[in-house]
Image (spheres, rainbow, N blue to C red):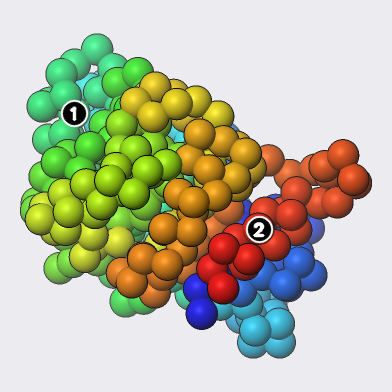
Amino acid sequence: MVKLGAHMSIAGGYYKAIDAAAELEMDVVQLFTKNNNQWAAKTISDPEVALFSDRLRDTGVTNPLSHASYLINLASPKDELWNKSIDGMSVEWQRAEQLGLDGVVMHPGAFVESTPEQGMQRIVDAIVEISRRVEAKKSWLLLENTAGQGSCLGWSMEQLAWLLERTGESMRVGVCLDTCHAHAAGYDFSTESGFKAWEREAKKLGVLGAIRALHLNDSKKGCGSRVDRHEHIGLGTIGLEGFERVLKNTVLKQWPMYLETDKGLNDDEEEWDAVNMRVLRGLAS
Ligand SMILES: [Zn+2]
Ligand SMILES: [Zn+2]
């Protein structure tokens, strides 16, 4: 059975994300372990860790995963931001490890005014340093494919493969596949041929085998738009058939999948997370 869930809020405590996921009958949950728009973070206390693991046990929610701060840019050409990002990402990974999470998802980085080649090398150098600092025994560092907006790297399977070849499993570095980002980056998940072409390429380059989690988001913008705008499942340019292919893919379906779609209520005053979960469950069965 496919394990499905969503990114949930930690307002009021880390365990609140688990409770909220359980309430909507989710199997898995993603959360921030700190304010995602700030560098500073209060240390996680032992009672908080205990409460978190108790709640996982009590609710049956599994595969907790975190998403790193949006401020981090491991491809930055500016030494100050680059060093701060290495510090910040090390903390994120340590916090994931402390809470016993499967891993922490991060966007590889943006090269801004440098070059893609320079940015890619910066990311590798940063990850090597981070993995030297963090002794992760459980948590993985997951590189998320991007939509390729602006100077964001990691949108193509070639780029992800290049990064994995220089980091990879020995450093506990894997991949989190975001469906919206892949589609926006130019891999047409709305058609059988487009998806198969992506799968062949990802397999050949060793990216498919490095995937350990998925973000399930439909896309507001078209295939190849390079614009990252999430849409509810089935209402975007990927569509229901696109998600059915992902949910039934023999390699992908073994990994936990998390929604990152807008919260709130639909016109029938039903929570969007509940709607999207129901749609996904229907497609998966
Ligand atoms: Zn994502
Ligand atoms: Zn996105």
Q: Residue at x 17, y 39 (%)?
A: 159
Q: Nearer the viewer, mark 1 or mark 2?
A: 2
Q: Residue furthest right?
A: 269
**Disc 1 and disc 2: Cα gap in Å?**
39 Å
The residue tagged 1 is 119
> Is 89 situated left or right of 155 in this image?
right
- Image quadrant where residue 149 sits: top left
**Ligand 2 under 8 Å from disc 1 Cβ:** no
84 vs 22: above or below:
above
For the residue labelled by badge 1, is the local secondary structure a helix, a strand or a loop? helix
For the residue labelled by badge 2, is the local secondary structure a helix, a strand or a loop? helix
Amino acid at the residue labelled 1:
Gly
Amino acid at the residue labelled 2:
Val
Front residue of 34 and 209: 209
Residue 126 in view of the camera? yes
> Is 19 situated left or right of 236 in this image?
right
Label 2 Cα neighbours within 10 Å, binned few <14 / some 14-19 / many ≥20:
some
> Is 256 situated left or right of 150 in this image?
right
Q: Residue at x 31, y 69 (%)?
A: 251
Front residue of 189 and 193: 193
57 vs 209: above or below:
below
Give residue 50's position: percent from left, percent from top: 63, 81
Q: Residue at x 65, y 58 (%)?
A: 279
Q: Residue at x 49, y 51 (%)?
A: 241
Q: Are marks 1 and 2 in contact (CB under 8 Å)?
A: no
Give residue 164's position: percent from left, percent from top: 16, 53
Q: Please give the label number shown on residue 279.
A: 2
Quarter of the figure that contains the C terminus: bottom right
| Nearest to N terminus: mark 1 or mark 2 | 1
Give residue 18's position: percent from left, percent from top: 68, 69
